[in-house]
Every structure is written in structure tokens, then in C-alpha cells.
Image: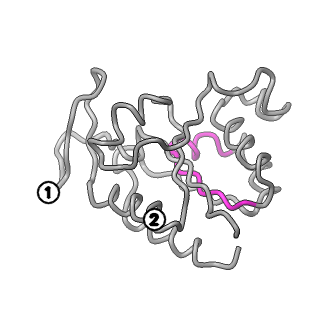
Amino acid sequence: MTPPPVLLLDVDGVLNAVRVDLPEGWRRGRFNGYVLSWDPTVVARLRALHESGRVELQWLTTWTEMADRLLAEPLQLPRGLRTHGRELLPTGYGGARAAASGWWKLAAAQQVARAEPGRRIVWIDDDLAEQAEDISEWLAANGQVLVVAPDYQLGLTHEELDRIEAWLDLPG
């Protein structure tokens, strides 16, 4: 059986939107000294995608293991998701392009893609737009990767989730 696509999930700017005033229904909490604001309906859709087997959620965030330990339960995401972090990458990993860019998340995404060639990947990170120049060559060579770069002030939206779900419905 083919494994589901991996969904690499960032926290800040994706789940945690930078908002002063929260829209109705949003939640706010303090974790490890940081205030996070999130839309529980967006998180519920991510959880449903994972629980239904449409994707395999994995953390790719500067929160690293703390995402699982501190954020998963309050955000109502599953515990025990695989975590990718800067310190978890093998020394020298990522190839010349990733090393030149210096962006550890690109090296981690490349590692995921190399571990299972051809496996589809959804990568959600608000910094993807800023890193477009560094990732464009890799994306061009890896058509099985969909990137979504939410506006950090809005976080991941239902419209972006609709786009992800439509992509998941396409033949792999």
C-alpha cells in the first residue's frame, strides 16, 4: 500500500497567526513563554486529514520536539508526530544548494523527499515565500511537492486548506 503524502507543518505564521485582535472562535494560549493565537477549525481540518490517512502530519518547525510536547494537545493535534529539526539533521546533510542557502528547513524537506523518492509532500511554512529563490530549483525537480506559504498575520486559511485538499485529490 502506498503511504499517504507527508504534510510538513510549521507553527509560527502557520498555526500561530500574528494577530492582536482574534476573530470569533479563535483561541490564544501561552506556551514556553510565547503567546500563540490559532483557529481551531483550521487545526481540526489538519487533524482530520491526518486521522483519515489522507496525509501523515510531521512537524517542521523551530519548535522542534516542543511542538509535540507543548503544543499538540492544547491545539488538539495528535501526539507523537515525527519531528524534523535543525539539530536532528546529519552533519553536512542537504547538498550544496541547501548548504549555500543556509536554510535548515530546506535541508530537512530534502531529506524527507530523499528518504522516500516519489512520495508526495505538502510543505506549509510562512517563510517559503521569502526562501523562494533558494527552493525554486529543488521544487522544479520535485513535482511531487506542493508548497503553501500562508501570510504570517493570517496563518493557514481554509482557502489554503481547500487548495491542499484539491491537490491531494489529484492522481499521485
Relative height, residue 36 to residue 52 (above, below): above
Q: Residue at x 42, y 40 (%)?
A: 11
Q: Is residue 110 magenta?
A: no
- Judging by the rendered image, the residue that carries numbered circle 2 is 49
Question: What amino acid type should be assigned to the residue bearing mark 2?
Answer: Leu
Q: Using a 10 Å C-alpha cutoff, classify the residue at mark 2 as few (fewer than 14 neighbours), some (14 to 19) or many (20 or more).
A: some
Q: Estimate the x, y position of residue 61 in percent, counting from the top left.
A: 51, 35
Q: Estimate the x, y position of residue 111 in percent, counting from the top left.
A: 74, 40
Q: Estimate the x, y position of residue 146 in percent, counting from the top left.
A: 63, 60
Question: What amino acid type should be assigned to the residue bearing mark 1?
Answer: Glu
Relative height, residue 138 to residue 105 (above, below): below
Q: Is residue 132 left or right of residue 117?
A: left
Q: Residue at x 82, y 56 (%)?
A: 141
Model colouring: one colour
SS at circle 2: helix
Which residue is situated farthest in the left direction here?
Answer: 24
Quadrant of image for the N terminus: bottom right
Q: Residue at x 34, y 45 (%)?
A: 153
Q: Is residue 113 left or right of residue 8?
A: right
**What are the residue bounds of the magenta stretch?**
119-132
Relative height, residue 90 to residue 136 (above, below): above
- Judging by the rendered image, the residue that carries numbered circle 1 is 24
Q: Is residue 103 left or right of residue 25?
A: right
**Distance between mark 2 and mark 1 Cα atoms:** 24 Å
